[in-house]
Each structure stands twice: as C-alpha cells, then as structure tokens.
Amino acid sequence: MGHIIDEIEHGTRTVNGIDVTIRELVWNDLGRSFEVHRVDTGEDLTEDGCFDTLPTDEQIADPLADRQPDWWICRGCGTRIDARTGADLIVEHVRDGDPVDGAGNPIGGPR
C-alpha cells in the first residue's frame, strides 16, 4: 500500500453557497487523489472515496447535497458545532464552558 509524500492545497471554492477546500494528495507511486472538505465544519466530503482528478463544482455538489450540518448552538456564547460530526466537541464545550441559564446569563460566581 502506498503512502502520501506531498499535499498541495488548491484553495477555497464556493459551491452551492458553501465554502469548500480542495487538497491534492501525491502518493509515493506517483498517483494523485483529491480531497474536498467543508470550511465551516471541516467535514471530509470524500471520506468514502477521493476524486482522481481536480473535481468540478458539479462533482462537489453531489456529496454536499447529502451532508447538510445539524447545527448545535451554545446558548451562552453562540458557538456553532455540527452535531453530526462534532458530538465530542459539544461535550467538551459544555463541560469546559462557563455555566449559563437558558437565556445565556452566567450562573453563580467566578470559578
């Protein structure tokens, strides 16, 4: 099995109103593949299989349509986390954050 010897960033594109980044992976057998990630959630849209060539907007639109985020929003600070992919981040945020009531007002005194 090959291994990655280089990564080339191809910047950010907006597809159907969603910003995505494209990363080219160069393999030791001289093969190449392309990963696509959402900017807002970091989700890898190509985890089920990378593109063999630089993808078009139409090719990127297909996996985007199947993966809309399920936003969890902290009532205290307004932080948004995709609940589908960031459940551990939500737990950490709630555990490590300052306690607030349902209206976002601090509860108790200083820590």
Image (cartoon, rainbow, N blue to C red):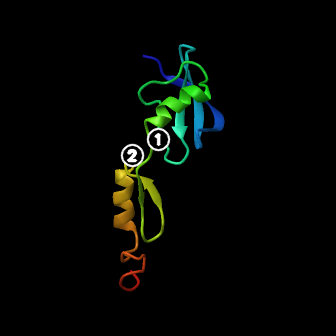
Measure how far apart labels 2 and 1 are at the Cα level: 7 Å
Q: Position of residue 43 (x, y in %)?
A: 47, 41
Q: Outermost residue toward the top? A: 29
Among the 4 quarters of the image, the one containing residue 91: bottom left
Quadrant for the C terminus, please: bottom left
- Which mark is drawn over residue 111? none
Q: Nearer the viewer, residue 42 or 96?
A: 42
Tell me: residue 21, above or below residue 70: above
Q: Residues within 10 Å of mark 2 (few under 14, many from 20)?
A: some
Left or right of 90 on screen, residue 65:
right
Residue at 55% from the left image edge and 26% from the top image edge: 59
Residue at which label 2 appears? 85
Among the 4 quarters of the image, the one containing residue 60: top right
Tell me: residue 92, above or below residue 66: below
Among the 4 quarters of the image, the one containing residue 58: top right
Q: Residues within 10 Å of mark 1 (few under 14, many from 20)?
A: some
Residue at which label 1 appears? 43
Look at the numbered discs 2 and 1 and tell me whether their residues touch, using CB distance below 8 Å.
Answer: yes
- SS of the residue under disc 1: loop
Q: Position of residue 38 (x, y in %)?
A: 53, 41
Hey, what amino acid is under mark 2? Thr
